[in-house]
Image (cartoon, helix red, strand yellow):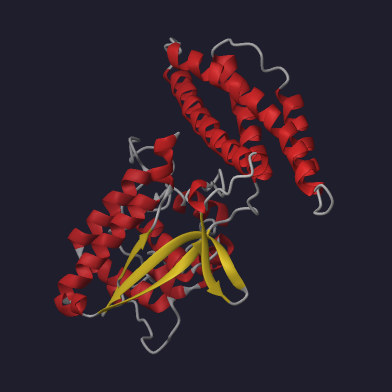
């Protein structure tokens, strides 16, 4: 059961508009709570934000059924504090249990005797809020700020930096291995849904691919380095070509013979597996192609033609020339800030352009 917010106040819990905040304190929690305080005081704006939260948290379910859960307002408050203060869920749990002003903002009174805020409960609720929803709420907040101070947009400043992605060091052999591991996990599942044989050796093929990738990693520079490297990549590419060929046959059959099972869940599961396998097949094909061009054919492959991560395909190789970190893997981000401190963020993306070639 979900409710937007507590309409009835509690004894010992001041109204949100009456929560006293120390404006002289420079901790980042203060402006976040002050912004939430203003948001709550605007019923129309508050309802718009809670409606967005409700779409993610409740969905098509009946909000009046089930056990009582966190209110939509509490989820909005915790999500705002986590993002604004860059908190871990353990830190957020401690704040939710011990920070008086935050508890008052969450409409929790001092004599509250129910179970404490467990970090798992906080995580499960906050993670329901999608990034698209957060962006829409940000637009609402910025629009409200510009309504209060319409001249703020006349003064802006901007800066660029790199948002790094969490990837391992990109080599063609490791990327090919990532793709093969995913394919050899997904393909047998899809084949079983379509009663297709030929994937009993998936685990054996995965072990062979790992062995070939380790041999490439052991190749050291020295005498006949290129020949030894080509021999290692030749073995890995032969395994890759065999797996990709089998996967292509499986995809062709799966696309032609969609499951006729009346079970909607089985159909959705098959469609999800098919779409995922199509991506991994295309990405692995691309990486194996660049490896063949660079290692086997001796061609110099531009960075724009390379994939640096199959799990984070938007990752770019950025040379900023900074001391201690001349090369970074991530995205270019441009942040533009107006006089009120509201930010507009844009990032470059080349993966959408590259997918047209798959």
Residue 320 shows in this picture:
yes
Q: Residue at x 22, y 80 (%)?
A: 155
Q: Hey, which quadrant is residue 134 in on the image?
A: bottom left
Q: Residue at x 52, y 53 (%)?
A: 303
- Residue 279 in the image: x percent, y percent? 49, 33
Residue 3 shows in this picture:
no
Left or right of 61 in this view: 218: right
- Single out the residue that lies furthest toward the right: 223
Left or right of 313 in this view: 136: left
Q: Is residue 303 above or below residue 78?
A: above
- Residue 275 in the image: x percent, y percent? 46, 29
- Single out the residue that lies furthest toward the bottom: 24
- Residue 334 in the image: x percent, y percent? 37, 67
Q: Is residue 242 above or below residue 288?
A: above
Left or right of 66 in this view: 320: right
Number of numbered discs visible in the structure rendering: 0
Tell which of 127 and 136 is nearer to you: 136
- Residue 324 in the image: x percent, y percent? 63, 75
Tell which of 323 and 207 is nearer to you: 323
Q: Residue at x 41, y 64 (%)?
A: 333
Q: Is residue 204 above or below residue 106?
A: above
Q: Hey, which quadrant is residue 261 in on the image?
A: top left
Q: Quadrant of the N terminus?
A: top left
Tell which of 147 and 204 is nearer to you: 204
Q: Is residue 198 above or below residue 147?
A: above
Q: Quadrant of the C terminus?
A: top left
């Amino acid at each position: 059961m979900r409710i937007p917010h507590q309409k009835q106040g509690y004894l010992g819990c001041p109204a949100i508009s009456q929560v006293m905040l120390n404006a002289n304190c420079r901790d980042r929690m203060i402006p976040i709570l002050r912004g939430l305080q203003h948001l709550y005081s605007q019923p129309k704006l508050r309802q718009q934000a809670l409606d967005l939260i409700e779409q993610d948290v409740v969905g098509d379910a009946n909000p009046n059924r089930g056990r009582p859960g966190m209110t939509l307002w509490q989820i909005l408050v915790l999500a705002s504090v986590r993002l604004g203060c860059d908190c871990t869920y353990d830190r957020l749990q401690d704040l939710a249990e011990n920070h008086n002003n935050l508890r008052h903002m969450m409409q929790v009174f001092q004599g509250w005797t129910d179970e404490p805020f467990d970090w798992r409960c906080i995580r499960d609720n906050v993670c329901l809020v999608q990034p698209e929803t957060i962006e829409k709420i940000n637009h609402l907040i910025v629009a409200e700020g510009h309504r209060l101070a319409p001249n703020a947009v006349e003064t802006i400043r901007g800066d660029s930096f790199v948002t790094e992605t969490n990837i391992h060091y990109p080599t063609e052999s490791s990327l090919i291995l990532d793709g093969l591991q995913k394919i050899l996990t997904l393909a047998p599942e899809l084949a079983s849904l379509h009663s297709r044989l030929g994937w009993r050796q998936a685990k054996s093929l995965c072990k062979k691919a790992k062995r070939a990738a380790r041999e490439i990693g052991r190749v050291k520079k020295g005498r006949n380095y290129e020949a030894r490297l080509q021999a290692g990549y030749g073995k890995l590419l032969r395994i890759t070509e065999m797996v990709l060929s089998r996967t292509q046959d499986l995809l062709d059959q799966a696309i032609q013979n969609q499951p006729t099972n009346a079970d909607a869940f089985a159909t959705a599961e098959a469609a999800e597996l098919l779409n995922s396998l199509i991506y991994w097949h295309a990405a692995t094909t691309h990486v194996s192609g660049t490896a063949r061009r660079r290692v086997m054919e001796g061609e110099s492959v531009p960075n724009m033609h390379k994939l640096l991560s199959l799990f984070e395909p938007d990752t770019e190789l950025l040379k900023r020339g900074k001391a201690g970190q001349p090369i970074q893997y991530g995205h270019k981000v441009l942040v533009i800030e107006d006089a009120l401190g509201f930010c507009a963020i844009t990032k470059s993306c080349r993966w959408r352009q590259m997918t047209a070639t798959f």
